[in-house]
Amino acid sequence: MIRLIVAAVLALVAVDAAFAQTTLRVGDQKGNSQAVMEAAGVLKDVPYKIEWKEFAAAAPLLEALGAGAIDTGLVGDAPFTFAAAAKIPVKAIAAVRQSRDGLAVVVPENSAIKSFDDLRGKKIATGRGSIGHQLILAALESRGWQANDVQIVFLAPSDAKVAYTQGSVDAWSTWEPYVSQEEVLFKSRRVITADGITPGLGFQVATPDAIKGKRAELEDFVRRLAAARAWSQNNVEGYAATWGRLMNIPPAVAVNWLTRAKIRIAPIDDSVAADEQKTIDLYDRWGLIRQKINAADIVDRSFGAAVGKGAGL
């Protein structure tokens, strides 16, 4: 019996030692995974090292994944689709579900533009291949408009903010927390949101090499991320205060964002695959991807149990 106990203890020590020697390189976007995981306290006992790398948008994050510079990261469904079509080796291992009201086209408080229809012929800033780009295309399609019915100005978020503030563009198609920052701090108005137009999915993605070589770390990470997001839904005020300090942004921005977003991490299932296929089909119709891809081929459902455990499902 003593030998069995000793063997079990040694086995656990060996597992912990193996974890301790591993580094999971995680890509993140402003105020997202790292912020909520730190606020929820789920990073205190991680048995491996997490190396965080922040990106301004999904496109450079996915480029880093393709180059092997990171193992996993958080992106929207639109840039993920572009990356998959470009044959970047990446798969979705968990989904991010939230309300679609925080993906929006915003205009300045005093703008004469009252609806998306007023943007015909106007300039809209957004990131190429971003979820903001996706929203514009879906809005155009819903009205039967053509691509040249608006002028899309492709800019990174920081540059889009400058152009928008200076009046070089008429509107900005963007996502959270940028939308809430504009609404709360500068009284910008949303003239259209993704609600009823796009799936509004996000994904935790990973490289095939990481899925194979760091599966245990990835399972542990998505479990903790799901737990953190579940915690944040029940602690909006507390999380908003912590987030505000971390980001040096007034907590009111986070309260605005989180109250309506209701962000949760969900397993990859049939509904997720179907929604991702809608994004693929949208880009296929607009001729923005060179080959048709199937959502089932670019998602990995094997992390569902870990996500469910973290989310309390």
Image (cartoon, rainbow, N blue to C red):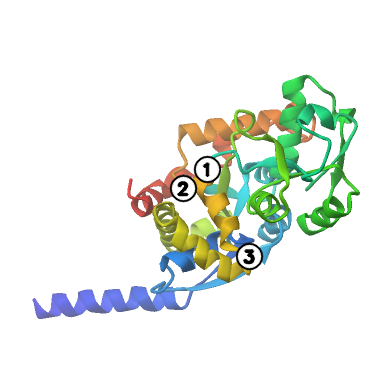
Residue 255 locus on image (x, y percent): 53, 54
Q: Which residue is mark 1?
A: 98
Query: Residue most toward the top?
Result: 144
Could you tell me if the residues under marks 1 and 2 are in contact, i.e. CB atoms within 8 Å? yes
**Residue at screen point 48% across, 68% down:** 38
16 relative position to 68: left or right? left
Q: Foreground: 113 or 103?
A: 113
Between disc 1 and disc 3, the foreground one is 3
Q: Which residue is mark 3?
A: 249
Local crowd at mark 2 within 10 Å, few (<14), some, or many (≥20)?
A: many
Q: Position of residue 57 (x, y in %)?
A: 71, 55
Q: Name the amino acid type tagged 1.
A: Gln
Residue 184: in sight, yes or no? Answer: yes
Q: Which numbered disc, 1 or 3, marks the residue that appears first in the sequence?
A: 1
Within 10 angstroms of label 1, few (less than 14), some, or many (20 or more) residues? some
Residue highlighted by disc 2: 264
Instruction: Relative to 247, say whether 157 is above or below.
Output: above
Q: Is residue 10 above or below residue 41?
A: below
69 or 186: nearer the eye? 186
- Disc 2 secondary structure class: strand
